[in-house]
Image (cartoon, grey):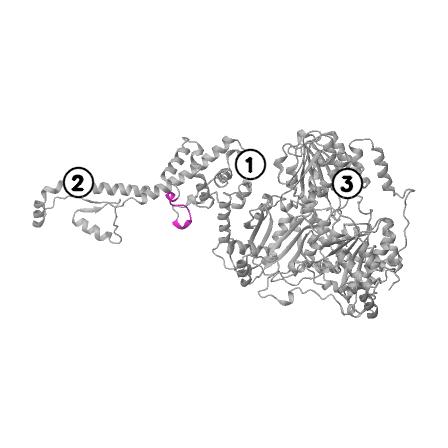
């Protein structure tokens, strides 16, 4: 049963223990092995019920061998083991059940008690910790000597990073693979995460990340790929020349760095509180950081900022916790701690309590610890009350709660890179600030903090506070960096491989740009992802530079983003480059990166089912959200593209490159660069190539040679050479800020959804905007610029105006609210029109919402006879009508904003003073002007409404018979006046007999008829005059 282990494997493990470097083993199985030997192993293992598959037996036997060799190499206690799996463990973790099975085997004579097998020894004394992948967060902060990862198909970049970082120096990482006929089978392996990448119209995921992962193993000096019999495969040919390494230690067995740390602790032994606290430090860098923090604490210069920058696993949070304990010993009373989540400060509070133990503070006697009652915070520590010397408080606050810092003496910002830059700026104030940031790591980081804020702090610390305004004025600044890892030694090969694979250490990958060309000389290129993730030297450098821009531009990044870029079928990448000089053999400078996700083309049946069930599948964010908001089942069938990210080079920000890239992308999808085919050509659809070659299937694992592919298309494709997809719209989803919204608004994007619950970390609302591409397939309701989107956009604006009156957006900044509403406030063009039709949408009847008493109160206010409180109940009605475009009154921007704050958001004048930075008298004066203009319009339509109800005398006009009427009147001595009246002149003509008889009969009534005639003439004149005045 014993097997001769390759000496190179033993040498690799022993070298790792000596140098405190980790080693990685990838173990794969092959079903075509010696069946007799396999049966013997299975009989041995099945007797203990430790396995459930043939391949499992051989793989776990090799794990036992590796653990045994590691135990022999490590002088201290037997290394602990972390076993991570998806949902079903391949061996029983129940100790009592296992002991019972061993006892039964001994009774049956199947186990010799004198010769205990390594597997039982491994299970009984290995100190195994079992963990599901979904619960991997609970292992953060723990350290293990060996990590076993099974169920490779369930691994993600985040899980890989999280589990590998728990292994100490000299430990082993073991990845278990199912039986493979060829290593290239990984290229086509279906990963669990691919299920989230698939949509109804894009379902063919490609394993580009697995291909790059496998190829990267060949470059790792401490990585070995082997089969189930510990035979080293050709991909690990670099291990052929491995030799034992000596280690430099002194007589006490300490390295040079450990000796320096010991000397530092001895020098500061008598100093309080530095001496007791520095004894808790593990590295020399960490000890120096704690000393720097305590220097600022004891100096008590409250306008200071100390920034601690380091990679993951360097002990930043521990150093901060010890520094806070020192601040309590120094007498600081109000200390606040903030981070993206209370879970991020778990280590900080843990070392804070260790610091209290070092300075002899006892829990329940000198201080109390309070846990959070919020179930989302998982009982995390949020407050510590100290009462040994005097009342002191350490309290956790969320990043957007900067208003609670009015009495702060010390603010600690942990994981500041995961907080948006404007939020970090708002946290700075007249108090001491400790700030830590992960420059690279798997928790999600961004370099906008170190590239912008810290650089500005460093520059302004040299300038006098008299010349600087704001929260950064005159602050003293100090930066500390930690380079030495805690769990393992420096220059660990697994860390270097891990950082390169997941693009974590990209802080130095941003090249300086010697020349910033005009945007008109630049061009947008499409990136071929097969070539980008092929692990070629140039492709790898280009990928690292792209990810560096991502990290520099966005505050939240994750290794999972890399797998999304590589494998998701609907995602596409574009880069904005300057003029390319083909004569120079070098990569062009990347000015901007755009990531796009194709969405839509969802069947109406699926849309109806989603609405009825209230469930939204993964992907297709904009179609499903649009369908949910407007209950529309037609829009999801449209095809669109969502811009996932835009990342601009730090040296090229705010120079128009991002806008130029978006404009080129819009023109590309409109078909202005390359014609869009009327019918989709199936030959143009990208079909993933089958990466399992026939040669790989014919050779065994021991003969297979894995190299990067050579038959690859060009990395960059000019947009004029690629046909665009046929789209109906472009969309974006982002955290709502004024700058971002104005950026997309300039490019004619309009919102259709704003979430009503702000993000707990950033305080931002989720926003989705849309831009129709005026496709012929979508019917437009009207001829406006928004096409089919027009009615939905108007509906959104009405809903948003109503929501401003509630609690959701009542505290939103007025500039942002005005930008979202985008009301028409200039109606000077209507003055050219004499009258407007009833169908123009303006308000025609004030009596529908306002009573005569309301109008009278408004009149009294505009005449300065009453206070503005008299009309506060009317203002919301007027504001709602105005911002719906029903009151055509021209207002300037500031009065319209005041009307929004008072009428829609219903805020008081004090709040408006703070928002607009205006005096109270100015605000009331501008508000008065707005009310006067609105009342003038209301008085006009009220006068017209009352006038329209008055009785009118009907006037008959004679058209086309003027000559005939003239002749008749001339016969009777009359004529037609130019004004339209008729006058009859008496000429003394004798009337006929009949006339005399009439005259004689009615002679007594002439005066009365004359009075009536005069009265009618006067009425006609007044009516004619009034009509002319109209």
Which comes sooner in the sequence, label 2 or label 1? 1
Residue 481: assigned label:
3
Q: Which residues are drawn in magenta?
A: 837-848
Q: Tell me if mark 3 has few (under 14), some (14-19) or many (20+) residues whose alpha carbon lies within 10 angstroms of its own.
A: some
For label 2, the SS is: helix
Q: Nearer the viewer, residue 165 or 887?
A: 165
Q: In which quarter of the image is the N terminus?
A: bottom right
Q: Tell me if mark 2 has few (under 14), some (14-19) or many (20+) residues whose alpha carbon lies within 10 angstroms of its own.
A: few
Left or right: where 314 falls relative to 887? right
Q: Nearer the viewer, residue 2 or 841?
A: 2
Q: Residue lying at the far front in this picture: please name it.
A: 107
Up-down relation of residue 351 to residue 271 (above or below): below
In the rendered image, residue 839 lying in the magenta stretch gets the answer: yes
Question: Spatial distance from mark 3 to mark 2, Cα to Cα?
Answer: 108 Å
Residue 223 in the image: state x and y as whole percent: 82, 56
Residue 830 in the image: state x and y as whole percent: 43, 45
Question: Mark 1 highlights which residue?
Answer: 915
For label 3, the SS is: strand
Question: Mark 2 highlights which residue?
Answer: 1011
> Which marked residue is nearer to the observer: mark 3 or mark 2?
3
Left or right: where 167 falls relative to 418? right
Residue 321 in the image: state x and y as whole percent: 73, 38
């Amino acid at each position: 049963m014993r097997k001769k282990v390759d000496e190179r494997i033993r040498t690799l493990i022993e070298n790792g223990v000596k140098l405190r470097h980790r080693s990685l083993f990838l173990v794969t199985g092959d079903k075509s092995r010696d069946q007799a030997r396999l049966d013997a192993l299975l009989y041995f293992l099945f007797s203990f019920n430790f396995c459930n598959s043939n391949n499992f037996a051989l793989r776990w036997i090799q794990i036992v061998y590796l653990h045994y060799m590691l135990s022999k190499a490590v002088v201290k206690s037997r290394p602990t083991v972390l076993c991570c799996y998806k949902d079903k463990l391949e061996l029983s973790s129940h100790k009592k059940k296992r002991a019972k099975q061993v006892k039964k085997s001994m009774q049956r004579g199947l186990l010799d008690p004198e010769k205990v097998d390594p597997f039982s020894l491994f299970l009984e004394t290995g100190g195994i910790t079992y963990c599901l992948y979904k619960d991997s967060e609970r292992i953060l902060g723990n350290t293990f000597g060996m990590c076993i990862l099974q169920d490779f198909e369930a691994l993600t970049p985040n899980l890989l990073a999280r589990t590998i970082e728990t292994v100490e120096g000299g430990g082993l990482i073991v990845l278990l693979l199912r039986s493979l006929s060829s290593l290239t089978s990984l290229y086509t392996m279906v990963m669990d995460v691919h299920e989230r990448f698939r949509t109804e119209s894009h379902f063919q995921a490609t394993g580009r990340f697995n291909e790059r992962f496998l190829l990267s193993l060949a470059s790792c000096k401490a990585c070995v790929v082997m089969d189930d019999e510990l035979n080293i495969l050709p991909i690990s040919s670099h291990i052929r020349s491995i030799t034992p390494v000596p280690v430099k230690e002194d007589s006490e067995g300490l390295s040079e760095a450990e000796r320096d740390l010991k000397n530092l602790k001895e020098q500061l032994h008598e100093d309080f509180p530095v001496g007791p606290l520095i004894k808790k430090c593990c590295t020399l860098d960490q000890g120096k950081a704690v000393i720097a923090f305590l220097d600022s604490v004891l100096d008590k210069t409250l306008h200071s900022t100390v920034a601690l920058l380091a990679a993951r696993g360097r002990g930043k949070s521990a150093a901060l916790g010890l520094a806070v304990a020192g601040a309590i010993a120094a007498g600081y009373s109000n200390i606040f701690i903030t981070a993206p989540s209370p879970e991020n400060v778990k280590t900080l509070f843990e070392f804070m309590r260790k610091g209290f133990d070092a300075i002899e503070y006892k829990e329940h006697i000198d201080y109390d610890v309070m846990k959070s009652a919020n179930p989302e915070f998982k009982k995390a520590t949020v407050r510590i009350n100290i009462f040994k010397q005097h009342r002191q408080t350490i309290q956790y606050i969320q990043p957007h709660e900067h208003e609670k810092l009015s009495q702060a003496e010390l603010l600690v910002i942990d994981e500041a890179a995961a907080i948006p830059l404007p939020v970090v700026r708002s946290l700075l104030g007249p108090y001491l600030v400790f700030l830590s940031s992960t420059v690279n790591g798997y928790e999600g980081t961004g370099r906008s903090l170190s590239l912008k804020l810290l650089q500005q702090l460093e520059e302004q610390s040299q300038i006098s506070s008299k010349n600087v305004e704001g929260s950064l004025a005159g602050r003293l600044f100090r930066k500390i960096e930690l380079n030495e890892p805690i769990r393992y030694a420096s220059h660990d090969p697994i860390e270097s491989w891990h950082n390169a694979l997941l693009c974590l250490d990209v802080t130095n990958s941003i090249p300086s740009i010697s020349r910033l060309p005009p945007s008109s000389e630049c061009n947008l290129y499409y990136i071929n992802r097969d070539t980008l993730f092929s692990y070629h030297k140039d492709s790898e450098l280009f990928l690292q530079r792209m990810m560096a821009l991502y990290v520099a531009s966005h505050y939240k990044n994750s290794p999972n983003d890399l797998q999304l870029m590589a494998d998701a079928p609907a995602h596409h990448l574009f880069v904005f480059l300057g003029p390319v000089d083909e004569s120079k053999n070098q990569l062009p400078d990347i000015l901007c990166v755009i990531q796009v996700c194709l969405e839509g083309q969802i069947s109406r049946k699926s849309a109806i089912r989603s609405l009825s069930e209230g469930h939204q599948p993964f992907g297709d964010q904009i179609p499903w959200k649009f369908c949910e908001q407007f209950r529309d089942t037609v829009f999801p069938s449209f095809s669109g593209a969502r811009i996932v990210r835009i990342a601009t080079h730090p040296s090229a920000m705010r120079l128009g490159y991002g806008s130029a890239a978006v404009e080129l992308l819009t023109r590309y999808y409109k078909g202005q660069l390359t014609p869009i085919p009327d019918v989709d050509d199936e030959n143009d659809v990208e079909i993933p190539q089958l990466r399992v070659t026939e040669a790989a299937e014919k050779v065994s694992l021991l003969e297979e040679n894995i190299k990067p592919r050579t038959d690859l298309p060009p990395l960059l494709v000019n947009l004029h050479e690629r046909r665009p997809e046929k789209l109906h719209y472009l969309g974006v989803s982002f955290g709502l800020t004024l700058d971002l919204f104005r950026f997309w608004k300039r490019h004619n994007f309009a919102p259709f959804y704003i979430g009503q619950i702000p993000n707990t970390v950033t305080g931002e609302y989720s926003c989705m905007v849309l831009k129709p591409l005026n496709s012929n397939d979508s019917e437009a309701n009207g001829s406006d610029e928004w096409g089919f989107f027009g009615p939905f956009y108007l509906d959104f604006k009405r809903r948003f105006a109503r929501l401003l009156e509630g609690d959701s957006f009542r505290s939103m900044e007025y500039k942002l609210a005005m930008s979202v509403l985008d009301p028409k406030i200039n109606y000077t063009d209507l003055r050219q029109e004499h009258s407007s039709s009833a169908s123009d949408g303006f308000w025609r009847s004030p009596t529908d919402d306002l009573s005569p008493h309301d109008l009278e109160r408004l009149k009294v206010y505009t005449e300065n006879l009453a206070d503005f409180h008299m009309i506060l109940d009317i203002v919301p009605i007027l504001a709602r009508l105005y911002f719906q475009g029903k009151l055509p009154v021209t207002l300037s921007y500031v009065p319209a904003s005041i009307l929004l704050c008072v009428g829609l958001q219903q805020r008081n004048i004090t709040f408006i003073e703070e928002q607009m930075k205006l005096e109270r008298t100015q605000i009331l004066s501008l508000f008065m002007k707005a009310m006067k203009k609105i009342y003038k319009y209301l008085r006009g339509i009220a006068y017209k409404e009352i006038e329209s109800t008055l009785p009118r005398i009907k006037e008959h006009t004679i058209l086309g018979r003027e000559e005939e009427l003239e002749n008749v009147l001339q016969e009777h001595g009359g004529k037609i006046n130019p004004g339209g009246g008729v006058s009859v002149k008496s000429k003394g003509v004798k009337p006929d007999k009949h006339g005399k008889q009439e005259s004689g009969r009615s002679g007594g009534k002439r005066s009365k008829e004359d009075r009536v005639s005069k009265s009618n003439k006067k009425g006609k004149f007044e009516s004619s005059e009034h009509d002319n005045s109209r």
